[in-house]
Image (cartoon, rainbow, N blue to C red):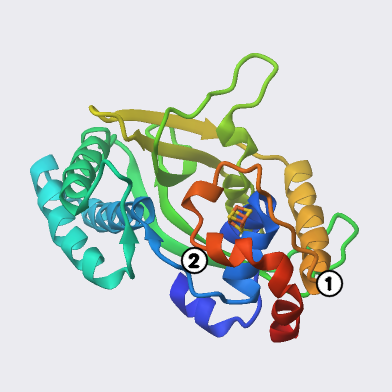
Amino acid sequence: MNIQDLRRDIARYWSQSRVSCFLRCSLQYAFRYVYRVEPAFTPAALSLGSSVHRVMEMVSLLRREGDIPTADECADLFAEIWSRQLQEDRNIRFKPDENAESCRQQGQQIVRTFRENIDEREQVLEVSAALAVPLITSGGDILPDPLIGEIDLLVRTPEGQKLIVDWKTAASRWPVAKEGERGKADREVQPTALLYAYKMQHGEVLGFRYDIVVKNKTPVFQRITTSRTQDDFDRLVAIIAVIDAMTRAEHFLPNDTGFMCGDCEYADACQNWNRDRRRLVSCAA
Ligand code: SF4
């Protein structure tokens, strides 16, 4: 079963994107997943990220067969997928200094950078592997809805370590861990959710690595590894249990102080939220 099948067949579920969305802005979560408000546009960064992801998925499937495309072939593949993405995505909104052509060029640079940084000694074990597992608290209680997720890539490193790898594009370099402090990768929900799901499904706690291309004029490649403990898993399940209770009670609030408001597809609905609240609550019931 792939992730699309899981999303279609499981009526209610949790995922790292849902949890992350709720933690950033619970009202955006509500518009997207509870009230099902039609998004006003698709941010160009999201379309670009989807195309990059599709290219990297194809590159990894070929890699698994021992056939790694060249950087030029990756760039050609991106151009083809990007033209399809432009047809598929609804009302793509570009930033003032970008358009479809500049994003094509940027996407081609990004996939070239990913390709140039592939460690050919690594063995590809799985590509786009779906996971679906129960959420169990430290006290043994099972939450009503499962956790689902998708692993971009599972590799065995030359040192023999199994790692979940996730591809990211970013506007700026991710802050890395300094002495006594955790870096961005150590605080993300995604590694916790995927490592928990992998452990529940396969009984192994793996490592996790972000392969990131920073969208500078000349793209920069960052490779950041992180790990999680049983306490991190217990904490994630505890957080989801609280979110579950809050969503059932429709306790949603705007986070106007967040950095995401400028690029939020629900900004109009958000402006009217306090006036429309009675209608929204009744339509979700
Ligand atoms: S505009 Fe800002 S506060 Fe409103 S839903 Fe979007 S992210 Fe949340």
Please give the residue where the numbered disc 2 appears in the rendered image: 130
Q: Residue 157 lies in what quarter of the image?
A: top left
Closest to the observer, 277 or 122: 277
Q: Residue furthest right?
A: 139
- Residue in the image at 86% along x and 54% along y: 138
Q: Is mark 2 within 8 Å of ligand 1?
A: no
At label 1, the amino acid type is Ala
Closest to the observer, 207 or 20: 20
- Residue in the image at 66% along x and 78% along y: 12
Classify the position of ligand 1 by quadrant: top left, top right, bottom left or bottom right: bottom right
Q: Is residue 34 above or below residue 204?
A: below
Residue 5 point in image, percent of width and height: 47, 79
Closest to the observer, 240 or 284: 284
Q: Is residue 63 above or below residue 149?
A: above
Callout 1: SS? loop
Point out the image quarter for the C terminus.
bottom right
Residue 198 seen in render: no
The mark closer to the camera, 1 or 2, is 1
At label 2, the amino acid type is Ala
Residue 151 point in image, percent of width and height: 47, 56
Residue 52 point in image, percent of width and height: 29, 51
**Could you tell whether 277 is left or right of 122 in the image?**
right
Please give the residue where the numbered disc 1 appears in the rendered image: 249
Callout 2: SS? strand
Counting residues from the N terminus, which is met first, the one under dot 1 or under dot 2?
A: 2
